[in-house]
Structure formats: C-alpha cells, structure tokens
Amino acid sequence: MIATPPVASGPAPSAIASRPDRPVVLSCQGIERSFGGLRALKGVSLEVREGEILGLVGPNGSGKTTMVNVVTGFYPPQGGRITLYGDDVTGLAPHRVAQRRVARTFQNLALFKGMSVLDNILIGRHVHMRPSALGALFYWWWAEREELAHRRVVEDVIEFMQLQDIRDEPVEVIPLGLQKRVELARALVSEPRFLILDEPMAGMNQEEKEYIARFILDAREARGVTILIIEHHMDVVTAICDHVVVLSYGEIIAEGPPAEAIAHPSVVSAYLGERAAKRQRGGAAA
Amino acid sequence: MRTGHLKTSPGQLVALSDSPAVWAWVGALAVGLILLPYLVGNYMLTLVVSAMAAVIGAVALNMLTGQTGLISLGQSGFLAVGAYANAILLSDYGLPVWLTLPAAGLTATGISLIVGVPSLRLKGLYLAITTLAFSFIISHIILYSEGLTHGPNGIFVKGARLFGYDVQRGWPLYYLALALTAGTILAALNLTRTRIGRAWIAIRDHDIAARAMGIDLVRYKLLAFAVSSFFVGIAGALMSLQLRFVNVDVFGLILSIEALAMIILGGMGSVAGAVLGAIFLSFLPEVLRIGFSLVTDPNSTFYTNYVYEIRGIAYGLVIVVFLRFKPDGLVGMWRDAKKYWSNWPLAY
C-alpha cells in the first residue's frame, strides 16, 4: 500500500518515486476550475511521463472530463499552471493546444456527421496541412502532391485501425463501436505526441473493449505516443495503465500503480461507500 | 452506382471524379454551353445569363451557409455591394472591366469582414437576423451616400469592353458569364476537397471537435465570409453588367430568400446541389409563365400583373415542400435514383 494521504492535493512523493524517471510530458499544478458555485477542480496537480499510459479514474462527476477540457484549452483554468513539454500552455485556445500535437477524443462521440469516415479521418491531418486559400482555389497544380501525402498517412492509419471496408461510408450509419474507432483513428492521424482518450470504451461489449485496448497499446508501441485515458472499466485500467490517478469531488484521492491505487481505502469508499471500505479493511486485517 | 472502387494510382484517390462517364458528360455539357449562342435566341441567352449569375451567387452562399453552417440573409447586401462597386468603377471612373470585376469581389470581401467579425459569436437565428440587418444597412448607405452611389437615381452601367467586345449584351456577355461561372464552380469544388472546405464542414457539424482538431474557428469563419462574399460580389457585378442599370430596389430581401431557397432545394452543402437549385429556381418563373399562358386565355394579364407575388409564393412553396419531403434536395434525389437504378430490378 502506498502512503498517499486520502485528501492529498498533490502527487505524493512516494508515488512519483515509484515511476520510471522519464521526461515529463504534461505537468499540471494546482489547477482550479469552478462552474458557478461548484468547484469542479480543487487544486489538482498531476504529471504525465513520456511513453506512459496514465489512467484518470474516479466516480461520475469527480472532474475527470473537466480536467481534460482544462488541459486541452476548452475550459481555461481559473488557477494553476499547465506545462506541456516544458512550455507554459495555461489558457491557450484549443486549436493552439492541438497544434502542439495534442490529440483527443470525446466522451460523447464528436464525429462530423455530414462527412464520410475518410473525410473525418482526413480532418485529423488539419494541423499538418498548409495550402493557402488561393492554392486551394486553383488547387490541382501545387496542392495535389500534398493532398496525396496526407492521404497516405491516413490510409496507413485506416489499415492500422482496420477501417478499410467502411472508409467511404457516411459516418452516421456505422455502428457505435466503429464510430469510436473512427474517432480514435482521427486522433491518431494527427501524429500526436500526447493523446487524451475520454472514455474510449463507453458502451462497448467485452470483445470491442479488448479490441480498443489492443489498439491503444499498439499505438503506444508503434508510434511512441504518451496517453492519458479516462476509463470506467477497471479491468481495462489495471490491464493497460502504467500509472493511475483517482479523482473524487475535484481532488486527487489516490495515485500510483493501477492495482494499488484502485485498492486504496479512500478510492473504495469513494466508489462503494464507507461501509464497503471498512469491510475491506476488516478483511485485510483478518 | 458503380460498385467497383479499384484504384490503380494514388492520383485517382484525390481526383474530382474517377468515372469516365462523368467526364464524358461534363465534356458534352461544355461543348453544348459553348455552342449555345448559335442554337438559341437572344431571349433565351438573357435567361441563361441571369441563371448563371444566380449559380455563382448560390455556389458562394453554399460555402457560407451550406458548408460552414452560418445562415446568411445578407446575400442581397453583398450582391448590391458587388453591383455598385462594378457600376461605379466602370461608369464613373472608367476602369476596364477585367479590373472592375475582381474589384467588385474584393469590395464585397472587405465589407464581409466588417460584418463577419461581430457575427463570429452568433449562431443560427441570431446570425440570420444580423446579416438581414446588414443588408438593410447597406441599402440605406447606398441611398444616402449620393456623392458615390447617386442615391435613389441609380447608376447606368456602361462601357464594359473586353477584347474590343461589348460584354453587356448578346454572346460576349454570355461567354463572360460562362467563364465566371465555370471558374466559380471549379474553385468551390477545389475548396471543398481540401483543408479549407473540410474545416468548414467540420465547423458546421461539430465546432467543439473542430477546435480539438486544431481548426481556428475565428479564422475559418472569417475566411468563409470572405471567400463567399467575393463570389457573391462577382455575381452582383455580373448582374449589373446584364441589367445595365443598378438601383437599390433591384437588391431586395427577395434575392436573399431566393438564394437560400436555391441551396435548400439543391441540397445543403453540395456544390452540385447549389448549381442545380439555382438553375431550377431561375427557370421557375419562366416555367410558371408558360404554364399560366397555357391555362388562362391569351389576353389575360393575370400573370404579368402578379408576377412578383406568384414568384414569392412559388419560392415559399418550394422551400416548404423540399424541407418537408426531400431535405437532401435535388442532389439527394439524384443519389437515390442512381442507387435505385444500379440495383434494379433487385431491391438491394
């Protein structure tokens, strides 16, 4: 058991020490964010290290998605500081964060409904595309080569995510599990250094979950992406994450290697209530 | 619909169309359009040129409303700006027409940026009302800045010569209109299949996700306003060349409604749809006229007396019927028909 205090507002020194000493990708210090009278984040501090899969878990309404929205610029923090690869990105607009090669997916699918699967994925290349307005208007002569180069990257990812059969389908008509995969593909084609996945497995059955988990591991393996994942399926979290941060009511209540963090008494009581936590403690004592 | 998708070179993946049949039809259409002045009379040619101005306007509005999802009722304002810029530069300053046409487009672009900036925070109905207000403001400015626009008197447009031909009548006007229309359609298609068009559609479909993809909303919405109104300005300039007289009354609210009706009828967001819708609605009054002449007695002046009202009712009816029964417009109907016949006689 790690000695993380139940209401620690920063990463406990022992937890940091247990992680491999890799460069820090994302560092958040004392992030504050309120909505009206509700303090959604109460001074949250966390670090994501290069090449790791960090799981951000917690009960509903604990501030996980808010945290991601703060990091990606959708909700500028009201206090605290965010650095990405050492650069201060606090309060940067979402598209500026995206241009720093941070890609994300959304909790509730956020695909472009009027487009085909292929066009949806092509949009992911936006940050790498540079033809001017005039170049696009009179296009073919000097933009074709660039369009083709992007198309090649997209085709690679389509193959990687096994979406070949449906690339020309309108994204609206394909099943939910595939839509989630398209969203992941759209995030991957931007060749992110840091990828944020907000519940990529919500509403999936066991088989689909395993599929996505494999893609996530492959993405890290083959592309060296650092990943922050919000997920409710604890089996997946323990299986693929290197490090887990548990949020509850806008505060970090535990942090550490997956199995330990999830078994932490304050996490058990946050999820299952005080009685279950007591019972677990009693069982451990006996 | 062809079922085969075998591509043998990467270029085919990004081509406008990889179907030889499509190119054959486009070629036939091009030949037909080039030969048109030899085939039809002046009256028909005049109708076709008006239809072409409508096509340019509809394709341009489609960029803003159909693709970027910014509903604009300011079309008539931008048409007026383009027409007046062209008229003033041609008649009062005596500039050549090859300069006044792009200048008309750029003037509309410049003014669109002024409208565009406050519009960035507005969506849907609110943006529609803002742009509507804009078109009224434009007509007031035109009416009261008499020194520049001759106020209520209007301007006679004259002296537009290109390669020695008078491009305000007959076949020279027709060929100028044809070139402008072809250029606009090609530009719209190219925009649609590159970064900018995709970004516009992304903003329309899901602006939050679009931002997460690195799309700068402010920049791309302004770009949509700028590019769209450039072509609307050109359409206005073309109208002024054909009408040979511009006046505030020409650019009433009905033009904005008409343009919206065109892209709804054709199928929102589709370039082909905007073209089809514009052609359909431009020839609708003519069809109505012939229809009325068939059912009423030859001396009746019913249609000529109420032409404005009848047209208004027809546009309204077309919008309602299409929104209710064919929300995908003419393009959607065409797609369905293709699907049906490619599988015929089997249902699937």
Image (cartoon, grey):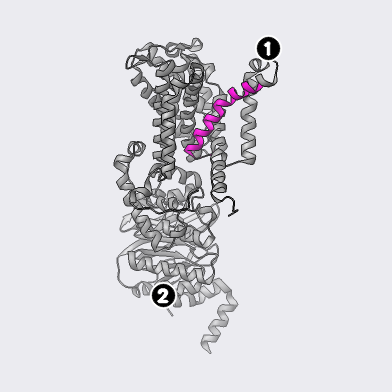
Q: Where is residue B119 in the image (x, y as percent from the top left)?
A: 48, 35
Residue type at tag 2: Pro
Q: Nearer the viewer, residue B209 or A155?
A: A155
Give me the residue at 48% from left, 63% from top.
Answer: A200
Q: Position of residue B145 (x, y in %)?
A: 46, 14
Give me the residue at 32% from left, 73% from top.
Answer: A20
Q: How many labels does the image show?
A: 2
Q: Which of A119 and A91 is in front in this view?
A: A119
Marker disc for residue B299? 1
Q: Is the magenta stretch mostly helix, strand or loop?
A: helix
Q: Nearer the viewer, residue A110 or A46?
A: A110
Q: Where is residue A94 in the image (x, y as percent from the top left)?
A: 41, 50
Marker disc for residue A257? 2
Q: Does the magenta stretch include residue B269?
A: yes
Answer few, some or many: residues within 10 Å of disc 1's Cα (few below 14, many 20 plus, some between 14 and 19).
few
Same subunit: marks 1 and 2: no
Residue A203 seen from this side: yes
Compared to residue B46, the image places residue A166 above or below, namely below
Q: Quadrant of the C terminus of chain B?
A: bottom right
Q: Nearer the viewer, residue A6 or A23?
A: A23
**Farthest bottom residue?**
A286
Q: Is mark 1 on a helix, strand or loop?
A: loop
Q: Does the magenta stretch include residue B274?
A: yes
Q: What element carries label 2?
A: loop
| Of labels 1 and 2, the one closer to you | 1
Q: Which range of residues does the magenta coloring cover? A: B267-292
Q: Where is residue A18 in the image (x, y as percent from the top left)?
A: 35, 75
Give me the residue at 46% from left, 29% from top.
Answer: B56
Subunit bearing disc 2? A
Q: In this view, does A113 lie to the left or right of A81?
A: right
